[in-house]
Image (cartoon, rainbow, N blue to C red):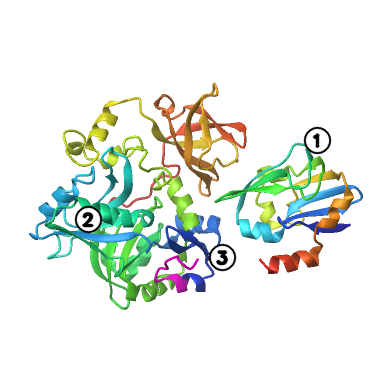
Amino acid sequence: MTDLKRTKLYNAHIASGAKMVPFAGYEMPVQYPLGVMKEHLHTREKCGLFDVSHMGQCFIIADDGTFETAARALEKLVPADIQSLEPGQQRYSQFLNAEGGILDDLMISRLGLEGHTHWLYLVVNAGCKDQDFAHMEKHLPENVKLQVKDDLLSLIALQGPRAVDVLGAMAPAVKDLVFMTHTDLPVGKNGTWCHVSRSGYTGEDGFEIAVKHDDVESFVEELLSYDDVELIGLGARDSLRMEAGLCLYGHDIDTTVSPIEAGLIWSIQKNRRVGCDYLGAARIESDIANKQSKRLVGILPEGRAPAREHTEIQDQDGNTIGEITSGGFGPSVGGPVAMGYVSRSHAKAGSEINLIVRGKARPAKVVKMPFVPHNYHRG
Amino acid sequence: MSTYYSEDHEWIKVEGDIGTVGISDYAQNALGDIVFVELPDVGASFSKGDDAAVVESVKAASDVYAPIGGEVIETNGTLEDAPETVNADSGGAGWFFKMKIADASELENLMDEAAYKTFCDGL
């Protein structure tokens, strides 16, 4: 694994007994001695700590020092409404290619810090970050600058019902944040400067915290001094997000599908659905109008056999109607869960389908997602 | 009664011409939390190395191979409802199936416990 990059928490992972695997060009912990199942359940019951420093972090700042110029520029590349973001708010969106296929999905925040409310802060997927940064460099106008911060910032996530108690003990002000808002403040006994966002990728209440590379080891050590906090690996991160019905780039979404087909219309504000001129806007418009397109749906297999990625989906007459894009065992569900694309005729909750697992047709049902109710703090 | 091990981490306990097959402690530990086991049909015949069963952890599915040839005479139905038994007792209650051994000389190519331990230490 000599060519792989390491996060600043690499030594902490090894010291904690992590099993490391290559992931998106990094050596990352897939699980700790607790194991995927217990790590998953611990996050749902108490609080899990994830190293997500492999993700890309950057700022977009306009030369004229206004939020509007930066927001207008970014709006050419994503379907979300950026101009209406208030300081301290964030939105989930996607980079699209000219055909409306998804290049990556990302989180976009407008900083709330005084003197910096014209700054946009983006978090993108590790596996896409180099091409995302090149995409922005290519398309952003000259007067809007991209500042990549991978050399400065680590990123960790604290997720689960106790996350607010733990982080709130270190910085009471974080308790006032609601889902999809953020703030910048000193946290913990060392007063570590953090960008704290109330969001995550597990369906639970919790935080994503950007912290300087030099501070991250001692900050994580302080978090781990709380009994409720356990390190959680990529294995449980995947089963948690799957139960929460959240897409994983490169699996549930990629350049072959549009945000509408992926069921992400909720992330496209009404004023951005028609008559806009961002990259891929025509596809958004036509996919909203075109009721024939395939749809990403939740799938609950009957019985215990998990249906993995690329499992063929058939209708009850044996016709191929789609494919599983994510599938496995949901520890909180206590059985298999899956996501996949089906033709629109079978996209309704309750539709009965068959999954072809090792040559055998196994019955399954299309269901509404999430599989486990979201536990976000909306205030 | 002797127990033999394959390089694919199956074990087979031999009593007369009947072999009981399972996966090793090393295998269950590497797989992690086992959530599903697919057993062969009674009456199925396998040659050495054939796919005989499937074991799935939270993350992935893995094949279990027939360590030697033979015919399946019994399967461990308790694994269908309690696949975690394989984690708890891989060498005992977590057995997968019993087979009537077709050719006992195939056992000679498998490892005994000491050789298997050395094999795992080298992985």
Gap between marks 3 and 2 measured at Cα: 42 Å
Q: Residue at x 15, y 50 (%)?
A: A73
Question: On the image, which quarter does residue A226 sit in?
Answer: bottom left
Query: What's the magenta bit mostly, secondary-structure-wise?
Result: loop
The part of the chain drawn in magenta is: A1-12
In this view, A286 is above or below A34: above
Question: On the image, which quarter does residue A275 sit in?
Answer: top left
**Farthest bottom residue in view:** A190
Magenta span contains residue A244: no
Tell me whether the residue at label 3 lies in contact with that at label 1, contact meaning CB atoms closer than 8 angstroms: no
Q: Examine the rendering and report whether any part of residue A180 can be seen.
A: no
* Residue A137: assigned label: 2
Q: Position of residue B20 (x, y in %)?
A: 81, 50
Q: Chain of mark 1?
A: B
* Residue B43: assigned label: 1
In the rendered image, the quadrant that contains the C terminus of chain B is bottom right
- Badge nearest the viewer, 2 or 1: 2
Tell me whether the residue at label 3 lies in contact with that at label 2, contact meaning CB atoms closer than 8 angstroms: no
Q: Amino acid at mark 1?
A: Gly
- Badge nearest the viewer, 3 or 2: 2
**Farthest left residue in view:** A64
In this view, A352 is above or below B22: above
Looking at the image, tell me whether mark 3 or mark 2 is earlier in sequence order. 3
Instruction: Using a 10 Å C-alpha cutoff, classify the residue at mark 1 as few (fewer than 14 neighbours), some (14 to 19) or many (20 or more).
Output: few
- Badge nearest the viewer, 3 or 1: 1
